[in-house]
Image (tube, rainbow, N blue to C red):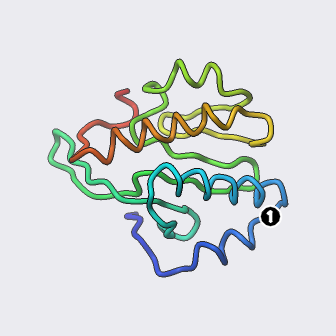
């Protein structure tokens, strides 16, 4: 399945997020990512709020585009997507506060419990890495 940009209203989507802590965190992340990227939010697929776009091309020849910075407020935790992989941010993640990770995902249950300055730096570094041209590395390679 290929995810693409949609015309859905990100504000309407965020206003409907439940539970309340996810909505609060989503609004905080919207502001943080908009500040870091200078881009307005857009819906990428049905549940990802994205900012800017990057193009990727892997050595295999597979290529495409994706949101350069993005998050998804899920019921269990908010997912912050790090296309350059969590390994690229290991030192900062040690200082972030309570979180779990996947290959290219940072899972946060409560933004009130993490250091938002550190989170902003993680998002900024990821944004700069993937939006600087065609990105050719998979998250798991970081």
Quadrant for residue 60, please give it. Answer: top left
Q: Residue at x 61, y 47 (%)?
A: 79
- In percent of width and height, residue 42 lies at 49, 69
- Does 99 appear above or below 15? above
Q: Residue at x 44, y 62 (%)?
A: 39
Number of labels in the image equals 1
Q: Nearer the viewer, residue 96 or 1?
A: 96
Left or right: 29 in relation to 16: left
- In percent of width and height, residue 36 lies at 49, 49
Quadrant for residue 111, please give it. Answer: top right
Look at the image and tell me in which quarter the C terminus lies: top left
- Does 139 appear above or below 5? above
Provide the secondary structure element on which disc 1 rests.
loop
Q: Dot 1 surroundings within 10 Å: few (below 14), some, or many (20 or more)? A: few
Look at the image and tell me in which quarter the N terminus lies: bottom left
- Does 53 appear above or below 120? below
- In percent of width and height, residue 84 lies at 39, 36
Q: Residue at x 73, y 52 (%)?
A: 25
Q: Which residue is mark 1?
A: 18
Q: Nearer the viewer, residue 126 or 1?
A: 126
- In percent of width and height, residue 139 lies at 39, 36
């Amino acid at each position: 399945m290929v995810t693409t940009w949609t015309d859905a209203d990100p504000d309407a989507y965020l206003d409907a997020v439940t539970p309340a802590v996810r909505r609060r965190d989503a609004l905080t992340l919207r502001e943080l990512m908009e500040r870091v990227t200078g881009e307005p939010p857009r819906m990428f697929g049905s549940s990802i709020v994205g900012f800017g776009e990057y193009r990727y091309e892997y050595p295999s020849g597979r290529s495409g585009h994706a949101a350069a910075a993005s998050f998804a407020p899920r019921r269990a935790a908010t997912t912050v997507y790090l296309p350059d992989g969590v390994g690229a941010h290991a030192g900062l993640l040690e200082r972030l506060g309570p979180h779990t990770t996947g290959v290219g995902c940072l899972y946060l249950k409560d933004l009130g419990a993490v250091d938002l300055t550190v989170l902003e730096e993680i998002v900024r570094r990821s944004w700069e890495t993937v939006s600087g041209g065609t990105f050719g590395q998979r998250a798991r390679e970081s």
